C-alpha cells in the first residue's frame, strides 16, 4: 500500500481592517472645503460688526455733546488767542480754528479752556473778542464751545448712518450664509454604519 497523502494545512485568512470613512484623505479634504464658507461668513460677520459699532460709538459721542449743550451752564468767555489745527486722516484732512478762552464760573473763579470755534468762526474787528461757551456746573473746569460745527456734524451723522446700514446688510447676508452652509442634524432614523474591530 502506498503512503497516504497528508492533507495540506490551511490557515484562516488574515482579516483586513476596513478603512474608516472620516479618516481617509478624501474625507478630510472634503471636510476642509465644507469649512471654507463658514470661515468666510465669519469674517464678514466681524466686518459687519465693525461697520455697525463705529457709528454707534461716534453717534453716542455726538449725543453726549448735545446733552452737554442743554444741561451745562452757558457763559461768555474772553477769547485769548486762535490757532489752526489739522484733523482727520491722511486722505481726508481738514483745518479747524481752535479758540483758547478764559471764563468765570458761577462762583467767580476763573478757568481756561479751548475748543473748535465751529460756526462762531474767528471774531474780526473787536478789541476784546468773546466766544460763547458752556461749562459743567458740577466741575467748572470742564467746558466746551457752545456752537460746534453743525454742518460737519450733520454730514458725519449721515455718513455713519450709511455705514451702519451697510454693516447690517453684510451681517444679514453672513447670517444667511452661515445658516445655509451649516450641516443638517442627523435624525435617529438615519442609518448608522458600525465596524467590528477584529480581535
Image (cartoon, rainbow, N blue to C red):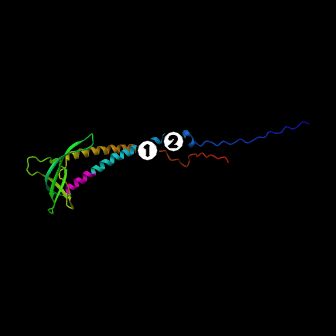
Report the span colored magenta. 60-70
Spot occupied by residue 153 in the image (x, y as percentages of width and height): 22, 47
Residue lying furthest bottom: 107
Q: Is residue 1 magenta?
A: no
Residue 19 or residue 134, whichever sits in front:
134
Q: CA distance from mark 2 to mark 1?
A: 16 Å
Residue 142 or residue 172, whichever sits in front:
142
Q: Is residue 63 magenta?
A: yes
Q: Helix, strand, or loop for circle 2?
A: helix
Q: Comparing marks 2 and 1, which lies closer to the viewer?
A: 2
Quadrant in the picture for the N terminus: top right
Q: Residue at x 20, y 47 (%)?
A: 150
Spot occupied by residue 86 in the image (x, y as percentages of width and height): 22, 44
Q: Is residue 46 left or right of residue 129?
A: right
Q: Is residue 194 left or right of residue 37?
A: right
Q: Residue 63: which numbered mark, if any?
A: none
Q: Residue at x 43, y 44 (%)?
A: 178
Which residue, given by chain and number where applicable, does mark 2 sit on?
A: 31
Spot occupied by residue 33 in the image (x, y as percentages of width and height): 49, 39
Q: Helix, strand, or loop for circle 1?
A: helix
Prevailing SS of the magenta stretch: helix
Residue lying furthest top: 2
Is residue 171 at least partly visible in the picture? no
- Count residues near mark 1 (Cα–Cα under 10 Å), then give few for <14, some for 14-19, many for 20+: some
Q: Which image quarter: residue 4?
A: top right
Spot occupied by residue 133 in the image (x, y as percentages of width and height): 16, 54
Is residue 45 at least partly visible in the picture? yes
- Count residues near mark 2 (Cα–Cα under 10 Å), then give few for <14, some for 14-19, many for 20+: few
Which residue, given by chain and number where applicable, does mark 1 sit on?
A: 178
Q: Is residue 111 left or right of residue 178?
A: left
Amino acid at each position: 500500500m502506498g503512503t497516504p497523502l497528508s492533507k495540506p494545512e490551511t490557515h484562516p485568512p488574515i482579516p483586513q481592517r476596513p478603512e474608516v470613512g472620516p479618516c481617509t484623505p478624501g474625507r478630510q479634504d472634503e471636510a476642509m472645503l465644507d469649512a471654507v464658507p463658514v470661515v468666510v461668513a465669519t469674517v464678514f460677520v466681524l466686518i459687519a460688526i465693525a461697520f455697525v459699532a463705529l457709528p454707534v460709538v461716534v453717534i453716542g459721542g455726538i449725543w453726549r455733546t448735545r446733552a452737554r449743550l442743554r444741561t451745562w451752564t452757558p457763559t461768555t468767555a474772553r477769547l485769548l488767542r486762535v490757532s489752526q489745527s489739522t484733523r482727520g486722516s491722511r486722505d481726508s484732512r481738514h483745518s479747524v480754528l481752535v479758540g483758547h478762552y478764559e471764563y468765570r464760573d458761577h462762583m467767580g473763579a476763573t478757568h481756561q479752556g479751548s475748543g473748535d470755534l465751529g460756526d462762531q468762526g474767528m471774531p474780526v474787528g473787536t478789541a476784546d473778542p468773546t466766544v460763547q461757551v458752556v461749562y459743567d456746573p458740577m466741575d467748572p473746569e470742564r467746558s466746551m464751545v457752545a456752537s460746534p460745527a453743525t454742518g460737519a456734524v450733520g454730514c458725519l451723522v449721515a455718513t455713519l448712518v450709511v455705514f451702519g446700514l451697510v454693516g447690517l446688510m453684510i451681517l444679514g447676508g453672513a447670517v444667511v450664509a452661515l445658516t445655509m452652509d451649516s450641516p443638517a442634524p442627523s435624525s435617529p432614523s438615519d442609518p448608522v454604519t458600525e465596524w467590528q474591530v477584529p480581535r
